[in-house]
Image (cartoon, grey):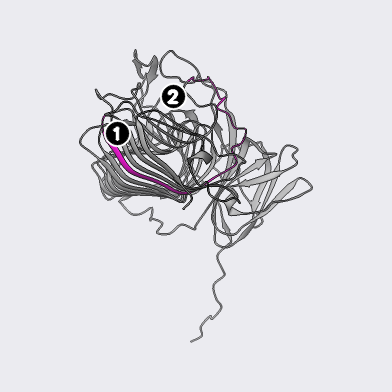
Amino acid sequence: MTYDNTPPPPPPAVITWQAPAGEIASSDFAEVSAAGTRLFVYQAPVRAEILPTGGLASHKPDYAAERASFVIFDMTAPVSVRVRPARPFKTAELRPERAGIPTRITNGVIEFTLDRPRKMTLLLDGDNTKALHLFAGEPETNIPSPDDPNVLYFGPGVHESTGIELKSGQTIYLAGGAILKAKLKPGDKGEYSEQWKVVFHHGTMFHLKKVNHVRICGRGIVDAGDIPHPGGNMLNFDRAHHVQIEGITLRNAANWNFVIGKSEDVEVNDVRIISGRLNSDGINSVNSRRVRIHDCFVRNHDDSIVVKTTVAGFPAEDIRVEDCTIWNDWGFALGVTYETRSPVRNIVFKNNDIVFSRHWIFGIHVSDGSLVEDITFTDTFVSNLDGVSNATGTPIAWLSPGPMLFRGTIQKDCWGHDAERGRIRNVLIDGVTLYGKTIPPSELYGADAEHDIRGVTFRNIRLAGQKPIADLTGLSVKKNDFVSDVTCKSR
């Protein structure tokens, strides 16, 4: 008997997938390749033109929008990336800056080396329009079999669905090169809201109601571009337990992308989100416990990754958001925002990169009656935001003139339902490195003596390459009389 001792060939350095027929490539980049492998350049509308309605701002059916480009691939070793933009340019910058990846430009081609899987963004000439987002992932593991009766398998190509109700023990797999398009249910004409002056369309693409041990994974795309705004969610959890979401891309949400509602023991890993319409919150953990959101990329036109409690009786607690990359075109990048009808406690945002933020990098905004306490933002790296203003779509008077480091407020607004306001206690903003020339301002406003803010610590806040700010005189912090125990420390 003879044996073949030839070792198996090494895995390819780059794993990619052919886009389905009919998918239109971005015209902003003539070529993108990694380790010599040509990558399909997808596109997504961002920063959609805003239509005032007298209620909830919306968009015309044929709304104008900017365009962002993105590529999806996995890598097994360091790879050389080549990008040929379709327009003339002089400089090329990769964000997040802390990755320290230099670019080389030769004859209109940008080259750089990715040392490991990363979520990177390429800007030309410092312009934050027409960006290229690169989603380089770890190779997939534990790929489910299409023959498994508990697997809903979407292979390469275009698929359509009016929504999927998952069952306990099920897995949904979206293969690379698959696009699942959300559609309205037949006869769905929506429901007009006199309060908001818009037509709402309900439903969701993936609905996880009272299920256990569910997984949604793969390298495919879920697209909601055919759903009018404001429409349903991409994913909606309702009292789900032991859920894993990993690797998929969500594009052009018609409302909140991702709602983790009244659920426990949830893992969200390596999810990529690009949405440009209003109210397209990225990942909202709502009334949930023991949630971990890790290594995700979120670009959207409302709060990016935040915690809420929209109903009473279900506290939000023990939530960690780590190693994520955020491009926030509107609202809060990270924080606890608006609806706070149950207590919120023990929330940690750690080791995240903010590559763009038009309004608030961190925030806690309380518009209902519960206590928000023990909130930590730590080890955050913020890209250069100098010169960024809030001028996008329709001006809104209460928005800041530009990016802010932290906004802590307790106030009544259109989202709050409770008769009285809540309180904020024990907030730590620690280890923030900013790559611009200035540190954005902060503001703290309690509602009254009974509904106040106590205990906000700024620590190790610095511009890149400089020493941390030693005391509050080095930060621009506005606050009212209902705020106490605010400190700034260098260590």
- The three-letter code of the residue at mark 2 reads His
Label 1 SS: strand
Q: Which mark is residue 169?
A: none
- Report the magenta residues as a range: 369-397
Between 358 and 204, the one nearer to me in the picture: 358
Furthest residue toward right: 107
The x, y position of residue 146, in whole percent, is: 38, 53
The residue tagged 1 is: 423
Q: Amino acid at mark 1?
A: Arg
Q: Is residue 157 above or below residue 75?
A: above
Furthest-left residue in this view: 313
User: Residue 117 at what x, y percent from top left?
Assistant: 54, 56
Q: Give residue 335's quadrant in the image.
A: top left
343 or 248: nearer the eye? 343
Callout 2 secondary element? loop
Residue underneath mark 2: 229
**Percent coordinates x, y for residue 361 in the rendering:** 48, 38
In the rendered image, residue 386 lying in the magenta stretch gets the answer yes
Given residues 201 and 473, the one toward you in this image is 473
In primary-sequence order, the first of circles 1 and 2 is 2
Image x and y of residue 74, in percent = 53, 55
Q: Nearer the viewer, mark 1 or mark 2?
A: 1
Pick the residue in front: 408 or 483: 483
The residue drawn where x is 36% and y is 27% is 185
Specify whether residue 49 is painted magenta. Answer: no
Tell me if 344 is positioned left or right of 103 in this view. left
